[in-house]
Image: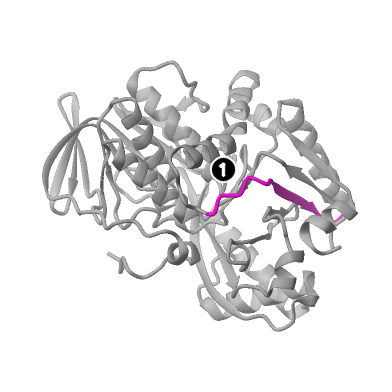
Amino acid sequence: MTDPLQPVSLWDATAQPLDPLPALEGDVDAEVCIVGGGYTGLSTALHLAELGIESVVLEAEKVGYGGSGRNAGLVNPGVWLSPDEVVGILGEDAGERLNEGFRVGPNLVFDLIRRHGIECEAVQNGTIYLASSDKYLKKVKDRAEQMNRRGSKVVLLNREETATKLGIDDFLGGSLDTEAGTINPMGYARGLARAALKHGARIFGESPATALEQTGDSWRMGTPHGTVRAKRVLLATNGYTDNLWPGLRQEIFPFYFFFAATKPLGENLRNTILPGLEGSWDAEEPTIAFRKDAAGRLITGSIGSLPEHGQSFRHRWADMRLRAHFPHLGELEWESSWMGKIAFTTDHLPRLNELAPGLMTVIGYNGRGIAPGTVMGRAMAHYFAGSSEVEMPLPVTAQSKAFLGPLRSIYYDLGAGFLQRWQLLRG
């Protein structure tokens, strides 16, 4: 176990605290057992509770310990692929079902935040997809056109409009998704947990699932100090999936990301850089994100692990990138940096697997987990309840393995690390 008092990210340190959750002691029964206290697991528990169905959530560490408490906090619709690419992979019916199901994700997130009074620095002013060249401007425009054709509200920005939104004139243009927004991601995870607990769900922290076996028409989940017996089980561990179920870890190839946050900017800079608190990321690969939090900290990050240099390297890289785009910032003071893991799949689409009768998993958000995870949690709750009110966005598929998964992880990590070092040498 890690130290529960040690923050895993800036978001962990600044979000409204959650009362300590008990570890599971003894044997309990539930209709549904959920493994993983991130967005998917907590959304499932909350929506099950609202449907009057009892659930137990087992979290190995603390709520939001994984990617849910470490990501950029950009609440975007859809997946990383464009809507047309999704249809090309899944076919017309399944592809458009996924596109529509995840398109409305940000509105579901912000509706839950308002309905349950979740304090998480929520700002639904949109997110900006940035283009640094004509090549990427075409990519941005194509994606916006595909999204708007399907009912989204994406506005194209010219160079001047982008400069006004971002506070710098480095990009040729961009697109503003007006229904997207930003949050403190750990604050949102804790808010989902509070709401689920209030409605009757049971959530146990520091209770890793160590054994899983089928007994008759039920499942028995073992932890270090107790067990859960349930008719249905959802494994919602995503990038932090272990070997609880044979082969599930091989469904994905994990990949690291990192972020760094400055100390709060002065008032003049705060009023000119992202004054509307929109989140932003660029179309170039590997993508770089820019955003501010409610206190005026400027936050940037990208993919890659950088383990051998740790915080020092992350701060140097972030300093170099911010100075390249925001030369007027002056001397930067860094408050914190952190890392996390993304669960990638070979086609960059999430998976909904039925591993065995009554045993399900949702895995592989490919770095786009806030809204899709919330959507899938609601859909899983209705699925377990036997309700047809909410359509499942993903097709149910059999378990598979990510082709050359470990090698892909190494390849992408080395590639990102090489690029970041080259950028430091260059800049």
The spot of residue 409 in percent (x, y) is 53, 57
Q: Quadrant of residue 233?
A: top left
The spot of residue 302 in percent (x, y) is 63, 62
The spot of residue 226 in percent (x, y) is 13, 48
Q: Nearer the viewer, residue 306 or 19?
A: 19
Which quarter of the rendering shows the C terminus? bottom right
Report whether residue 107 is seen: yes
- What residue is at 74 percent from the left and 49 percent from the top? 129
- What residue is at 45 percent from the left and 60 percent from the top? 15
- What residue is at 68 percent from the left and 47 percent from the top? 125
Which quarter of the rendering shows the N terminus? bottom left
* Residue type at tag 1: Thr
The residue segment tinted magenta is 121-133
The residue positioned farthest toward the top in the image shown: 388
Report whether residue 67 is seen: no
| 69 relative position to 204: left or right | right
| 213 relative position to 308: left or right | left
Q: How many marks?
A: 1
| 415 relative position to 355: left or right | right
| 289 relative position to 196: left or right | right
Q: Quadrant of residue 147?
A: top right
Depicted 34 relative to depicted 409: above or below: above
User: Is residue 128 rendered magenta in the image?
Assistant: yes
The spot of residue 374 in percent (x, y) is 48, 38
Depicted 309 relative to depicted 283: above or below: below
Q: Quadrant of residue 320?
A: bottom right
Residue topped by disc 1: 346
Badge 1 element: loop
Q: Nearer the viewer, residue 257 or 389?
A: 389
* Label 1 crowd (10 A; few <14 / some 14-19 / many >=20): some
